[in-house]
Image: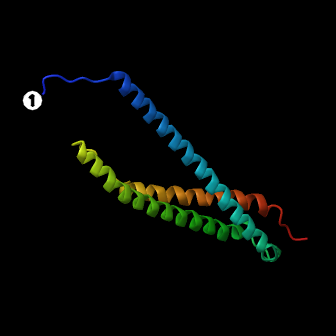
Amino acid sequence: LNAVDEVQIDMLWMQRLLTITEISQKLVLAIGIALGVGVLLVIGNTIRLAIQSRRDEIIVVKLVGGTDAYVRRPFLYTGLLLGLLGAMMASLMLVTCVVWLGRSVNALADLYQSQFHVVGPGFSGILTLWMIGALIGVMGAWVAVMQHLREIEPK
């Protein structure tokens, strides 16, 4: 800049800020992984309860020659639906938070004459979130079905 004669920067302060930023990123990642595992367990438990409530129906299907894959399919669809709906709700909350916080952050950035602006995840980010949610739902359902379907055998 032509009007600026001298710039003073505190490198120690910048290093501290970068370290805090790195710690925050790792903390957010750890929380995200923990929440993903929690969702996996909740969906697995929901599917387990559905299997237990349909135990008699499963026995009848197996008695008439239904395969495990035939019995497994509706539960996998349920897990997919639960994961996808959960991801859709999460993306709605995320977009709401970005819009809600974005105004305040943008106003703060304007006070400091900064070009910083809050940007949401975009279409590809939301689509990725939906796919991850659906995948977690199917994985949770798969684990629950494989675990509990073996226990249900006609006598």
Q: Residue at x 65, y 58 (%)?
A: 140
Q: Is residue 57 left or right of residue 81?
A: right
**Residue most extreme to the front:** 111
152 or 84, nearer to the observer: 84
**Residue most extreme to the right:** 155
x%, y% of residue 77? 61, 68
- Dot 1: element: loop
Q: Residue at x 62, y 65 (%)?
A: 79
x%, y% of residue 112? 24, 42
x%, y% of residue 8? 24, 23
Q: Residue at x 85, y 67 (%)?
A: 153
x%, y% of residue 138? 61, 60
Residue 115, by quadrant, is top left
Q: Residue at x 54, y 63 (%)?
A: 86
**Amino acid, disc 1:** Ala
Q: How many marks?
A: 1
- Where's the C terminus, which quadrant? bottom right
Residue 136, by quadrant, is bottom right
Q: Establish if 30 lies above or below 122.
A: above
Q: Establish if 145 lies above or below 7.
A: below
**Is residue 117 visible from the viewing direction of this image?**
no
Q: Which residue is mark 1?
A: 3
**Residue most extreme to the left:** 2
Q: Is residue 92 left or right of residue 73?
A: left
**Is residue 104 visible from the viewing direction of this image?**
yes
- Where's the N terminus, which quadrant? top left
Q: Is residue 5 left or right of residue 26?
A: left
User: How busy is the neighbourhood of tag 1: few (under 14 within 10 Å), some, or many (20 plus)?
Assistant: few
126 or 146, nearer to the observer: 126
107 or 59, nearer to the observer: 107
